[in-house]
């Protein structure tokens, strides 16, 4: 799960990391009154789940409260990578002497959390990695002992020569590790970590990704989910225990299992069609899930045909068949459906479908070909 | 022969009295697996289905019934602890079926498993099956047949699909292993390829990868440098949009790393035949045997 900058900053603040104050505005008027309270220049920052906000015009410096209103007006409603900006963070502008990067990420290859720090902050770390990899210091953290204080100090020395700055940075790095662990994150970044002319070290931008599997344990983090930043169908799917991602094609796909779902989408492409979505109905097949899946898919106006590819294991084919029949009773489906069911309780499923006037196939390639043809309007398939 | 499980496998089921654990225990027994014990804390002393003794701890199952393998069906929140318990009790092979295990939990469990000299398969995996001999996990027994092909995969149902097509074409399998779709797993492609290379029954290997991570690329180099047996590969997720998670926590494309195109290229560059569709495995494997 992605969280917004202002939410990541709340988590960092709660762990004692120096982060300048900031408040959220959803209208230009709110932005103005927040800026008036701070006095002096502020930064108005789009809160969307997308990188490159600055380049897209989503981050602007405002001289005073009146200007904050103008800047907020320009940013609210802006489209950044397909997402509409609905909130801005208003925060006092800081005087910056230097910018550094501090991040920690879960690394699959070493099966550990890895710290990355660089004195070149304020730009994407990917860019630094590409142009000046020597400017990045990495440290794999042994999960048995966690981040040790001397390691944090070592990372801090890679950022600053001055011992006062290095000690502040080491303290921030220790607290970042604590925050990362406590929130169940898979990524936490401070970029930039700044020094002020007075010699203070502060985090002025933050990003965190949270492991979806840990949300049950951290309800206060789970509550940070912003469903306004994702398609409504994806929220509905998640609430029903389905995994759904909308794409732009014409063949609506309903599959059990993520790997088979991806392979089915690939087959749709292989046979000349385009998948409308990724949809995994998961392991235990409750007919209600199938009904919800069909509601979501038929609500997408681009969809021209529906493809079921079910390999029964834990999922029982007869449950899926019952769901299809139930869905056609509850909602009107004008779209052609191609169904393939194999595995657990396959014979019962085919009988249920036949009684309701559907035919079912047993071969994956056949059903994908049929669905692609149906999407093109060829009903002879 | 086979890899990891065979006639000497003595299985303890962690979470035997749960819904999934109970259902799959019956299926495993029916398939011929020696299920010697079950574990559910607080239910020690009971008999599961009037035949399998239930204990409070894995240690008791090891001590009293010589369990050497465990399979875990406990809820995600307790799965990592179940792995720790099994490793501590001296279990040699731990198969974790549980889905949705927090990544940081697994990160702590993995070095412990290694220190104890155990092997973990999973989490979030379908387990493994040696056709006609033994199954540990949830792979459907009716779709496999004994033969010369090793199957290793990050997926569940996609693996069933490929096994089903092989069996339908009369091509049997030595052992089929689902290593799991999570970002942190106990046994990777290279571990399985190494075991298949050493297994006299296995004459060719099907490797089913997915987008995300770099395990397939590492495996491709292993095949090029260390394997004498032919390998046929497949990557699911060619049409996945970058940066989106496709169900499995593992299937995340970050930057240029881990796309299907990149992995398929790595396969081809290392002499691995690439199946464009699951159905292509049949022809490519038949040609390789």
Image: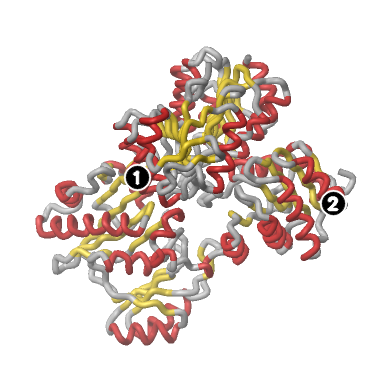
Is residue B176 visible in the rendered image? The answer is no
Give how far apart the Cα atoms at labels 1 and 2 are: 49 Å
Q: Is residue A78 visible?
A: yes
Q: Quadrant of residue B264?
A: top right
Which residue occupies 19% across, 57% down? A169
Q: Mark 1 vs mark 2: give the one in front.
A: 2
Q: Relative to residue A83, is residue B170 drawn left or right?
A: right
Element carrying mark 2: loop
Q: Is residue B229 above or below residue A43?
A: above
Q: Chain of mark 1?
A: A
Q: In front: A280, or A95?
A: A280
Instruction: Judge from the rendering whether residue B240 lies leftward or rightward of residue A378; answer left or right.
Output: left
Q: Nearer the viewer, residue A162 or B115?
A: B115
Residue A205 sits above or below residue A311 on the image: below
Of labels 1 and 2, earlier in sequence is 1
Residue under label 1? A129
Helix, strand or loop for disc 1: helix
Q: Is residue B49 left or right of residue A214?
A: right
Find residue B100 and report its horizontal and vertical position in percent: 48, 49
Furthest residue toward right: A380
Q: Position of residue B156 (x, y in %)?
A: 58, 39
* Count of numbered marks: 2
Within-10-Å neighbours for mark 1: few <14, some 14–19, many 20+: few
Q: Quadrant of the C terminus of chain B?
A: top right
Q: Which residue is mark 2?
A: A377
- Tell me if A94 is positioned left or right of B171 in this view: left
Q: Tell me the quarter of the picture where residue A333 sits.
A: bottom right
Residue at (81%, 57%) from the top-left corner? A335
- Percent of width and height locating residue A210: 41, 57
Question: Does A366 appear above or below B243?
Answer: above
Query: What residue lies at 85% left-to-right and 50% top-to-bottom?
Result: A358
């Amino acid at each position: 799960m992605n969280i917004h900058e202002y939410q990541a900053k709340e988590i960092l603040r709660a762990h004692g990391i120096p982060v300048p104050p900031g408040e959220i505005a959803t209208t230009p008027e709110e932005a103005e009154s927040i800026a008036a309270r701070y006095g002096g220049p502020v930064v108005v920052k789009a809160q969307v789940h997308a990188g490159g906000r600055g380049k897209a015009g989503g981050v602007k410096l405002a001289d005073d409260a009146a200007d904050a209103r103008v800047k907020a007006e320009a940013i609210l409603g802006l489209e950044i990578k397909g997402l509409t900006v609905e909130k801005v963070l208003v925060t006092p502008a800081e005087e910056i002497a230097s910018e550094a990067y501090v991040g920690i990420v879960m690394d699959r290859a070493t099966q550990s959390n890895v710290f990355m720090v660089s004195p070149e902050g304020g730009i994407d770390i990917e860019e630094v990695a590409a142009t000046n990899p020597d400017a990045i210091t990495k440290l794999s953290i042994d999960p048995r002992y966690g981040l040790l204080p001397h390691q944090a100090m070592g990372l801090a020395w890679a950022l600053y020569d001055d011992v006062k700055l290095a000690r502040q940075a080491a303290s921030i790095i220790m607290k970042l590790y604590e925050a990362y662990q406590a929130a169940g994150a898979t990524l936490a970044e401070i970029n930039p970590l700044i020094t002020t002319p007075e010699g203070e070290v502060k985090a002025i931008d933050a990003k965190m990704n949270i492991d979806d599997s840990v949300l049950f344990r951290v309800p206060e983090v789970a509550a940070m989910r912003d469903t306004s930043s994702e398609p409504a169908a994806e929220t509905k799917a998640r609430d029903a225990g389905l995994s759904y991602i909308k794409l732009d094609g014409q063949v609506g796909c309903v599959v059990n299992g993520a790997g088979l779902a991806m392979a089915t989408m690939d087959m749709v492409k292989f046979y000349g069609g385009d998948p409308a979505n990724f949809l995994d109905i998961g392991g235990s097949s409750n007919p209600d899930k199938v009904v919800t899946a069909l509601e979501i898919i038929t609500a997408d106006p681009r969809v021209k045909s529906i493809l079921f590819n079910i390999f029964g294991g834990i999922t029982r084919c007869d449950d899926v068949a019952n769901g299809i029949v139930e869905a056609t009773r509850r909602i009107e489906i004008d779209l052609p459906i191609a169904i393939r069911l194999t595995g657990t309780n396959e014979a019962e499923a085919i009988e249920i479908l036949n009684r309701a006037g559907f035919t079912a196939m047993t071969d994956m390639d056949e059903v994908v070909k049929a669905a692609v043809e149906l999407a093109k309007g060829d009903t002879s398939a | 022969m086979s890899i990891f499980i065979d006639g000497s496998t003595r299985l303890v089921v962690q979470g035997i009295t749960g819904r999934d654990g109970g259902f799959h225990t019956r299926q495993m027994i029916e398939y011929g697996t020696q299920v010697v014990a079950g574990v559910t804390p607080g239910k020690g002393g009971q008999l599961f289905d009037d035949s399998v003794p239930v204990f409070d701890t894995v240690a008791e199952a090891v001590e009293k019934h010589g369990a050497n393998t465990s399979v875990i069906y406990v809820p995600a929140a307790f799965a990592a602890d179940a792995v720790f318990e099994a490793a501590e009790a001296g279990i040699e092979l731990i198969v974790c079926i549980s889905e949705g295990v927090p990544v940081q939990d697994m990160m702590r469990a993995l070095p412990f498993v290694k220190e104890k000299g155990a092997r973990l398969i999973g989490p979030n995996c379908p387990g493994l099956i040696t056709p006609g001999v033994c199954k540990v996990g949830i792979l459907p027994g009716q779709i496999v047949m004994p033969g010369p092909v090793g199957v290793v995969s990050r997926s569940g149902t996609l693996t069933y699909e490929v096994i089903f097509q092989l069996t339908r074409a009369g091509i049997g399998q030595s052992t089929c292993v689902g290593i799991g779709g999570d970002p942190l797993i106990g046994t990777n492609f290279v571990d399985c390829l190494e075991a298949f290379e050493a297994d006299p029954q296995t004459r060719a290997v099907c490797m089913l990868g997915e987008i995300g991570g770099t395990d397939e690329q590492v495996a491709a180099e292993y095949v090029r440098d260390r394997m004498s047996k032919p390998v046929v590969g497949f990557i699911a997720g060619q049409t996945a949009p970058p940066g989106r998670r496709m169900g499995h926590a593992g299937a995340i494309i970050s930057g240029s790393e881990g796309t299907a195109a990149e992995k398929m290229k790595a396969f081809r560059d290392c002499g691995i035949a690439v199946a464009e569709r699951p159905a292509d495995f049949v022809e490519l494997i038949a040609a390789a045997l």
